[in-house]
Image: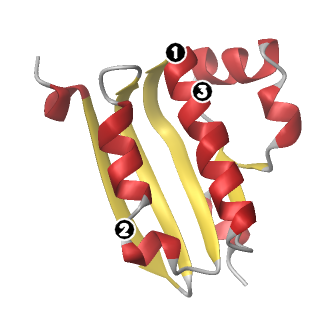
Amino acid sequence: MSVGEHLRVGVRNHADTAVVHLDGELDLASAPVFESELQRAEVAGAARVVLDLRDLQFVDSAGLRMIVTAHTHARERGQEFAVTRGPEQVQRLLAITRIGEHLRIIDAPEELAP
């Protein structure tokens, strides 16, 4: 399986909110794909960023680091930032590592809209 099939990242903008949808596995191999999408102008220039984790089947420590990095960069740019609630494995990892305590977790991207 290629990295492109390993993780699919889609970006859509609505009402000055960039929704970054992750589908697949966010890990060491796919982290660069995710990182390059976060650097796109439509993400960096939005007032709000939502990482949509609903279709993320797996995340490892490298993937968690990328989520934290995305949160940090958004805060540095003055953006609101949130992640959607992911599948059980993703939520469990966010809870075990206590990273979830530092993120705004929402059920759907529309919750962050103005």
In the image, 20 versus 55, the foreground residue is 20
Q: Secondary structure at mark 1?
A: loop
Q: Residue at x 16, y 35 (%)?
A: 4
Q: How far is the residue under mark 3 from the one under mark 1?
A: 6 Å
**Picture quarter with the N terminus:** top left
Disc 1 to disc 2, C-alpha distance: 23 Å
Q: Secondary structure at mark 2?
A: loop
Which residue sits at x=62%, y=18%?
88
Q: Which dot marks residue 64? A: 3
The reply, left or right, for residue 35 in relation to residue 67 is left
Q: Can the viewer see residue 73 in this picture?
A: yes
Asked which colour scheme the image uses, the reply is secondary structure
Labelled pair 1, 2 in contact (Cβ < 8 Å): no
Q: Earlier in the sequence, mark 3 or mark 2?
A: 2
Q: Residue furthest left?
A: 1
Front-most of residues 15 and 72? 72
Label 1 or label 2, whichever comes before in sequence order: 2
Specify whether 72 is left or right of 29: right
Amino acid type at image mark 3:
Leu
Mark drawn on residue 60 = 1
